Image (spheres, helix red, strand yellow):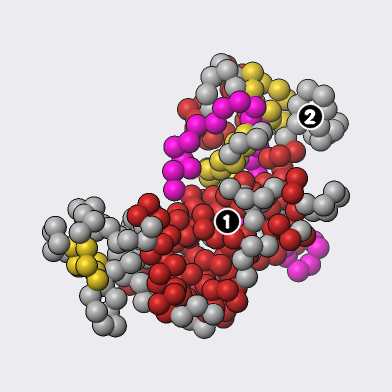
Amino acid sequence: MGRTAGDTRKGQHFLLSAAARRLSLSQIARLTDDQALKLFEGIRWCETQGDPVCPKCNCLAVYRHKGKRRIFSCKGCTAQFSATSGTIFHSRKLHVRDILLAIAIFTNGVKGYSALQLSRDLNCQYRTAFVLAHKLREALGKGMDEIEASGTIEVDGAYFGGHVKPANYWENRRDRRLAKNQNGKRRVVVIMRERGGRTLPFVVKHEAQSVTTLERRIRPGSTVHADEARSWDPLHYAGLNMKRINHQRAYSDEEACTNHAESFFSRIRRAEIGMHHHIAGPYLDAYAKEMAWREDARRIDNGTQFLLIALAAAGHEPSAIWKGYWQRAKSKAPTASAN
């Protein structure tokens, strides 16, 4: 899938090496409209070397219309379609080159990329950039909720969102760790991270609520590493080989270690604090899945990452959540935050 750390000079971090750089924004920005469209068609219909396939009947007998509309007609079902029809970019208004440029910008954001910054880079409305970035996150996270974890797995949970600003004067401040002093918006990202495999997150309100999902998605006989939080005690009775680590004594020992899970939390924490500044609860799951994908792809060069993201987006059906998002009644859609 791409060059790994073994291809770099000894002692050099992969992200600092030439092997990590296989794509630059200038390569995409310099494409003409025809070149950008041809590139997108090649990505979407890679199995036919870029030859269009009808998204309704999968017919290969397709002819291209001449003119500026850049559409196709199927000889089998007579349906008309474009290169983005039936994808997550269905009904798009941006030029295909701008979509490819947005994917490239999104790819190069190692710690994530904010919608506000993306809107400035593309010179488009914030709302357009917000929806576009979330469409990419939805494509990357497709199917994660159905994947089972197996082998040696690290399990942990961390709270995100729901920031409560401390009072100005010391005598008015309260312990914000207590439930009575919180605003109820904080959520827990629970991670199942296979050693040498996938990083699989999901979001719950409390750690204890995650046990049912963990029992369902971790295959019996797997070895699970976890800390000594009481939330994980029921996993001992789920046919799993449990190994626990007391973090008050050490971060790891010869028996148990959750450092890989903590590495994921470091990535999403840096994204929340340094890039997005605030992640609203309804969107936390999408951001967690994005960071899980980035964690798994951290040793893949950015050119391959660009193709993987573009393939995921081109192969994803129109989004039920984000298609027409801003046109819906406000009462039916969660409030967006500037992130």
297 or 23, nearer to the observer: 23
Numbered range of the magenta stretch: 142-171
Return the mark for residue 246.
Answer: 2
User: Which residue appears at 29% of the width and 83% of the height?
Assistant: 68
In this rendering, position of residue 238 left or right of residue 152: left
User: In the picture, residue 270 is in which quadrant?
Assistant: bottom right
Q: How many marks?
A: 2
Looking at the rendered image, the disc whose residue lies closer to the viewer, 1 or 2, is: 1
In this rendering, position of residue 291 left or right of residue 138: right
Q: Position of residue 189 (x, y in %)?
A: 59, 45
- Residue 144 appears in view: yes
Q: Check the image and report above or below for 325 versus 162.
A: below
Q: Position of residue 112 (x, y in %)?
A: 62, 62
Other-residue count near label 2 (Cα within 10 Å), few / some / many at <14 / 14–19 / ≥20: some
- Residue 164 appears in view: no
User: Which residue appears at 40% of the width and 69% of the height?
Assistant: 38
291 or 94, nearer to the observer: 94
> Is 202 within the magenta?
no
Q: Position of residue 318 (x, y in %)?
A: 33, 59
Judged from the image, the secondary structure of the residue bearing numbered disc 1 is helix
Q: Position of residue 85 (x, y in %)?
A: 30, 64
Q: Identify residue for label 1.
A: 304
